[in-house]
Image (tube, rainbow, N blue to C red):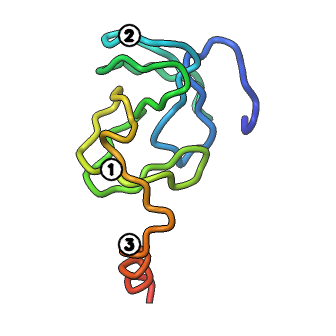
Amino acid sequence: MEHVIEKGADALYMDERDHVATALRDMQAGESIHYRSAAGLQLITLIDPIPFGHKVAIAGIAFGQDVRKYGEVIGRAVVEIEAGSHVHVHNIEGIRGRGDLGTKEAAERA
């Protein structure tokens, strides 16, 4: 199913490791939307409004957990994020190119 966009989904989900899907249109809080995973069409109810092109959490994300999109880490949760929530700069922080985190993560890998 990788890299195939099928009709009938409201959000784009690209990799089984992802925590988020990308909205394919403006969406309203309380709306139930669909995205496709390897398991088939999935349904999730939105907690927040999600603008076109923004990310929606498809599962709960713990405080401090890395957040994945397209199979890649795009940031780290600065609060606990519920499934159906808008995922953006208000609840994740970028971790690329941060020397303060690079030192800590290098020490953890050693």
Residue 37 lies, with reference to residue 79, above or below; the image says above
Question: What amino acid does circle 1 point to?
Answer: Ala
Which of marks 1 and 3 precedes in the sequence? 1
Give the residue displayed 37% in from the left and 41% down from the top: 89
**Disc 2 versus disc 1: distance between alpha carbons?**
23 Å
Label 3 vs 2, first from the N-terminus: 2
Q: Residue at x 40, y 21 (%)?
A: 44
Secondary element under disc 2, as helix, strand or loop, is: loop
Q: Quadrant of residue 80?
A: top left
Please tell me how crowded label 2 is: few (under 14), some (14-19), or many (20+) other residues with Cα within 10 Å. some
Query: Tag 3: Cα neighbours inside 10 Å, few (<14), some, or many (≥20)?
Result: few
Q: Earlier in the sequence, mark 2 or mark 1?
A: 2
Amino acid on which the number 2 mark rests in the picture: Gln
Q: Which residue is mark 1?
A: 77
User: Which residue in the protein does label 2 denote?
Assistant: 28
Tell me the kind of residue under disc 3.
Answer: Leu
| Position of residue 7 measured from the top left corner of the image (x, y, whole percent) | 69, 13
State whether residue 34 is above or below residue 19: above
- Which quadrant would the N terminus be assigned to in this image? top right
Q: Nearer the viewer, mark 3 or mark 1?
A: 3
Residue to which mark 3 is pinned: 101
Mark 1, other Cα within 10 Å: few <14 / some 14–19 / many ≥20: many
